[in-house]
Amino acid sequence: MRGLLTKIDRFLIFAESALIVFTMLAMVFLIVWQVIARFFLHIPVPYAEDLARLAVVWSIFMGATLSLRLDEHMCVEVIFKHFPKKLQHFAMLLIQLAVGAFALIMVIYGYRYYMFAANDFTTSLGYDRNIFFLPTPLCGALMLIYSLAQAIGSLGRLLGFDGPEEEKEGSA
């Protein structure tokens, strides 16, 4: 079972990374194309702005999700490192539960906004405008899963069970 979860985790990390790279490249390409088409070829490109904006939205949400999973999000460690280990684990548990609560709010309200915009179409693309709101509940669900998994690990370390992070530190 653990091997299957590890494979799913690696696939999600790969898929999120690939989507971030794709959206960033698409955004750069669309903006460069729009500038060249508008100023040099004198051709209007009405879809480029909406697609670039969509790429930005997806890359931001997927980047936040991936940084949470890889535990590379912003944090203040100056004071935190001076806490006793038990207090560090307890603080991490509280932080991860707070992140999980925020992710749950993202899922609930993100889904509401997604459904609210279901029949509103973009003028330049002709697609439902709700595609701009899809990253909120989707990435919120992934963040919820990641934060709960990390909270379980923190709870285990708080209760004295060796977590994977402590095993890595001890073996180095």
Image (cartoon, rainbow, N blue to C red):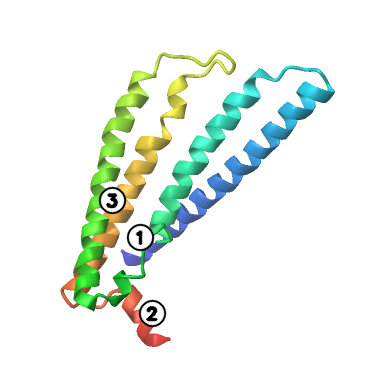
> Foreground mark, 1 or 2?
2
Look at mark 1 in the image and give the residue it sits on. 5
State left or right for residue 46 relative to residue 92: right
Q: Which mark is residue 99?
A: 3
Q: Looking at the picture, how far across and down is residue 32, in whole percent?
A: 73, 34
> Foreground mark, 3 or 1?
3
The residue positioned 39% from the left and 42% from the top of the image is 139
The kind of secondary structure element at disc 2 is: helix
The residue positioned 34% from the left and 74% from the top of the image is 165
Q: Looking at the image, do the residues carrying marks 2 and 3 touch, with CB atoms under 8 Å apart?
A: no
Q: Looking at the picture, how far across and down is residue 42, in whole percent?
A: 81, 18
Q: Which mark is residue 168?
A: 2
Note whether residue 152 is visible.
no
The amino acid marked with disc number 3 is Val
Label 3: few (<14), some (14–19) or many (≥20) C-alpha neighbours in 10 Å: many
Label 2: few (<14), some (14–19) or many (≥20) C-alpha neighbours in 10 Å: few
Q: Looking at the picture, how far across and down is residue 140, in whole percent?
A: 34, 42
Q: Looking at the image, do the residues carrying marks 1 and 2 touch, with CB atoms under 8 Å apart?
A: no
Say which label, 2 or 3, has the lower sequence index.
3
The amino acid marked with disc number 1 is Leu
The residue positioned 79% from the left and 28% from the top of the image is 36
Q: Looking at the picture, how far across and down is residue 96, in whole percent?
A: 26, 57
State left or right for residue 48 relative to residue 122: right
